[in-house]
Every structure is written in C-alpha cells, then in structure tokens.
Image (spheres, helix red, strand yellow):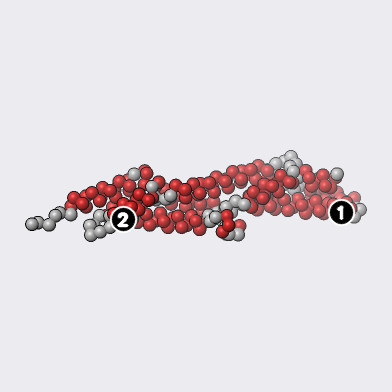
Amino acid sequence: MKPKSKAPRTKRLTLKCDEPLSSFAFKFNLRRYILVAEVARGPLEVPSARRLKEAVAAAHAWGDKLRKALPSRRHRPARSELPLMADLALLRTAAAHLPVQPNDLGTLDKAVEETQAWASRAQTLLAMQAPCELDQAEELLEEGLDLPTHCPEVDALDEAVQVAKSWAEDALAADSGNAATDALRELLEAGAYTRPPFSSTWELCMG
C-alpha cells in the first residue's frame, strides 16, 4: 500500500496560515493566529506557517516594548525616562503589520491623544497675552506632571510658574522691606515680561 500523500494536508495548512497573513483582521485576533501557528507545527514544511509564527513572535516582542515604554502608573519611571512622542510614533508604525492586541493599541493611542490634548492646552496658556490665574497654571502643570510621556510643554509651563512665583516673592519682600522706588519699578518692569502674565502675582504685589 502506498503511503498517503502529505500534499492535501500541506495545502490545508497553507491555506489556514495564508488567510490570517493576508487578512486585515490579522492585526486584531492574536489568539486565533497563535492557535493556527501551533496547529501548523509538525513534519510538514509550510512556509506560510513559519511566517505566521514569526509574526506572532514579533507581536509578542512589540507588546513587551510597549509595556516597557508605558508601564502602569505605579511602575512609571522618572519624568526624564518617560518615552518621547517620537518613540510612541515608532511603536505605532511597527504595529501596522503585526497581530497586536487591541487593548495594547488602545493604551498606545490613549497615551498619544492625552499628551497631545494637554500640550495644546499648555501652548494656549503659554501664548496668552492677557493675565491668567497662577492657580490655573499650577493646576494644568499638575496634570502635565502626571502624563505617561515626556512632554516639552511640561518643562516650559513649570519654568513659567516658577518664574512667576519667584517674582511674586521678590516683589512682596521688596514691598514689605520698604524698598526704594527704583527697585520696585525694576521689579514691576521685570514682571511685565513674564510669559504668560499671571494676574495673581500682580494682585499679591499691588493688592
């Protein structure tokens, strides 16, 4: 009796592995493709099964990189070690052709959207010409310090808030110490150039 040909089984497995590799849904059903890759193990040589297993392995590695870049809040590193937006953009690009988990993509996209939204608010405040409340800026800064990414606007706003606080302290000290008129005038001129101007610092000095 002739041994049964392996060709039909090879063809079936090839079709099973080719389908997810060519399907748009490939990116969104990791468990299914892990199962297909497991089934494809054996003595048969199925090139697409090998490609599928490589893709699944790459998706696992991508997930590890994402969790390292965006750990849980409890394990978040110092701000200087937080990922840049450029780092997250590279991760998003790499995920385009991998069967990554939908919740991992959601975590990545949420971090990007949250950072972009906050940065826009900070840019608006920093560009203001009319006085704004220092408390408002400090509240926004607290939100920025809690971002999962390293955002340059956090540093810019932090610097602006610290400059305003320092100016207010100098102005109060000069006023309570009966400083000379020229010294007070210099302080007022310096305060006029803080960006953004903070109404509460002026109120502390003038009120």
Residue picked out by circle 1: 174
User: Can you see residue 206?
Assistant: yes
| Image spot of residue 18 (x, y percent) | 29, 48
Q: Which residue occupies 28% across, 57% down?
A: 41
Q: Judge from the rendering whether residue 104 lies leftward or rightward of residue 4; answer left or right.
A: right
| Image spot of residue 39 (x, y percent) | 29, 54
Mark before the other along the chain sequence, 1 or 2: 2
Relative depth, front residue between 93 and 106 = 106
For marks 1 and 2, give the one nearer the viewer.
2
Q: Residue furthest left?
A: 1
Q: Which residue occupies 35% across, 56% down?
A: 54
User: Can you see residue 52?
Assistant: no
Q: Which residue occupies 76% across, 52% down?
A: 165
Q: Which residue occupies 74% across, 52% down?
A: 163
Q: Are marks 1 and 2 in contact (CB under 8 Å)?
A: no
Figure check: 71 above or below 126 = below
Q: Residue furthest front?
A: 1
Relative depth, front residue between 28 and 150 = 28
- How many circles with numbers are drawn on the protein? 2
Q: CA distance from mark 1 to mark 2?
A: 76 Å
Q: Secondary structure at mark 2?
A: helix
Residue picked out by circle 2: 38
Q: What residue type is disc 1 on?
A: Ala
For disc 2, the neighbor class at 10 Å (few under 14, some 14 to 19, many from 20) is few
Q: Which mark is residue 124?
A: none
Q: What residue type is disc 2 on?
A: Glu
Q: Judge from the rendering whether residue 174 lies leftward or rightward of residue 132; answer left or right.
A: right
